[in-house]
Image (cartoon, rainbow, N blue to C red):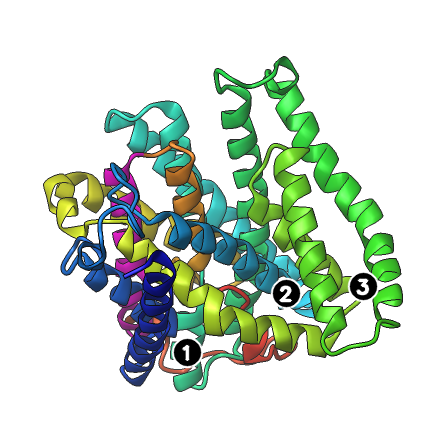
Amino acid sequence: MTLSLQILLFFALLIVLAKSFGDLAARFGFPVVLGELMLGLILGPTFIDIFRLFEPGSLSNAGDPSLPGIAKVLANLGAVVLMFLAGLETDIPMMKKAVGPAFWSACGGVILPLAGGAIVGHAMGLGWAAAIFIGTILTATSVSITAQTLMNMNELRSRAGSTILGAAVIDDVLGLIILSFVTASQAGSHPGASHESGGILMVIGRVTGFLVLGLLLGPGLVRAVFKRASRLQGPHSLTAIAFALALGFAFLAEYLGGMAAITGAYLAGFLIASHAHDEEVVRDVRSLTHTFFAPIFLVSIGLAINARSAGTAIGFFLVILVVAVVGKVVGCGLGAWASGFGGRESLVVGVGMIPRGEVGLITASLGWSAGIIATPTYTLMVVMVLVTTLITPVLLRLVYPWESPVTSSLPEIAPEADTTG
């Protein structure tokens, strides 16, 4: 069978199976992404190792047991597109209205997991670069499962529910900023890096300069581009130009800023959502993402790891899991408590921020592809994402007060506010 025929067959099977497993997960009350991730684990070396069914040297790369080259390229592109969609779906009004308690909850939920993950990783024998990257992965939050659970309990629009949704958005922004500095620092310390990239001050300058210029010049650029694009004839022209902007920002983020391409893609989506919002663009990007790019990215995560190997480092995994859970519960809970929440409400906010999702997976895959974290550590991070997603609904139902206070100074927030998971 030729390479082109194998590609057609492989991706046809992948998309159909991904949607089927996503549907199965949804029927049991879990996020669709969990089903697609589980499919990757089943098809990967954990169980089936589907690439053994294809001819050696065609889809699989000799000496590379992780991902075939073509699937890996599409998976990386899928990560960029996913973060572009996350930026497009950022609820700007919600960020403004819930900025007080949500901001402090997000800060606590970033600082403690980052510090805890870095300290534990280094204590377990990892270098500081890998240890700090583990902490960066732990800062991520995806509250789709939390939103689903609270919706079933009719508590999504309570004060705690609104704060969780707002904090999740701010959490992702803060996490991407930290990721930008971490990846830029790693690039600057690489033996082949140019002298301009060396030194922490240069790293800070490059990252800060790109972000500041993007936020200052980006709105005008986006408005001008969209104004001209609106005159183009042909279907979906605005969407095509929006994609071009996302890819361009992703390129500039990595090439000029020395940071992750996904940061540039998120920034492009955020700017479009803020200054040139178009429902047709959001619908088109959402459709293309969830029909093709997201399934490929999520399944590729499972294809890249052997989850059975996590059993050999069960102690390390349990410690990381404790840091992941306690870091969010305590960090976000303290932030909510400092903003005037009661003890039980603060606990609800902390528990609601436990699950990691696409942003955590994207961050982990980025560090693995760059060689910052090794394959065994990457595997543990993926399993951690699965476990935190599974335990959150149970914990929420245990800690949520029977009489939830819904009298709040915060306005009602629509359930569509979750942007990443």
Answer above or below: position of 421 versus 63.
below
Magenta region's main secondary structure? helix
Disc 2 to disc 1, C-alpha distance: 18 Å
Secondary structure of the residue carrying numbered label 1: helix
Provide residue 95's location: percent of width, then percent of height: 66, 63
Which circle marks residue 148 in the picture?
1
**Circles 3 and 2 in contact, beta carbons < 8 Å:** no
- Magenta-span inclusion, residue 86: no
Residue position marked by numbered label 2 in the rendering: 90
Precedes in sequence: disc 1 or disc 3: 1
Residue extending farthest top: 195
**The quarter of the displayed image where residue 257 is located:** top right
Badge 2 density bin: few <14, some 14–19, many ≥20, Cα 10 Å: many
Does 1 sit left or right of 284 as displayed? left
Precedes in sequence: disc 3 or disc 2: 2
Of residues 182 and 108, the one nearer the viewer is: 182
Provide residue 321's location: percent of width, then percent of height: 26, 49
Badge 1 density bin: few <14, some 14–19, many ≥20, Cα 10 Å: some
Name the residue at 37% across, 39% down: 368
Name the residue at 66% across, 21% down: 202
Disc 3 to disc 2, C-alpha distance: 12 Å
- Magenta-span inclusion, residue 383: yes
What amino acid is at disc 3? His
Disc 1 to disc 3, C-alpha distance: 30 Å
Secondary structure of the residue carrying numbered label 2: loop
Name the residue at 39% across, 45% down: 364
Residue position marked by numbered label 3 in the rendering: 275
The region drawn magenta spans 374-397
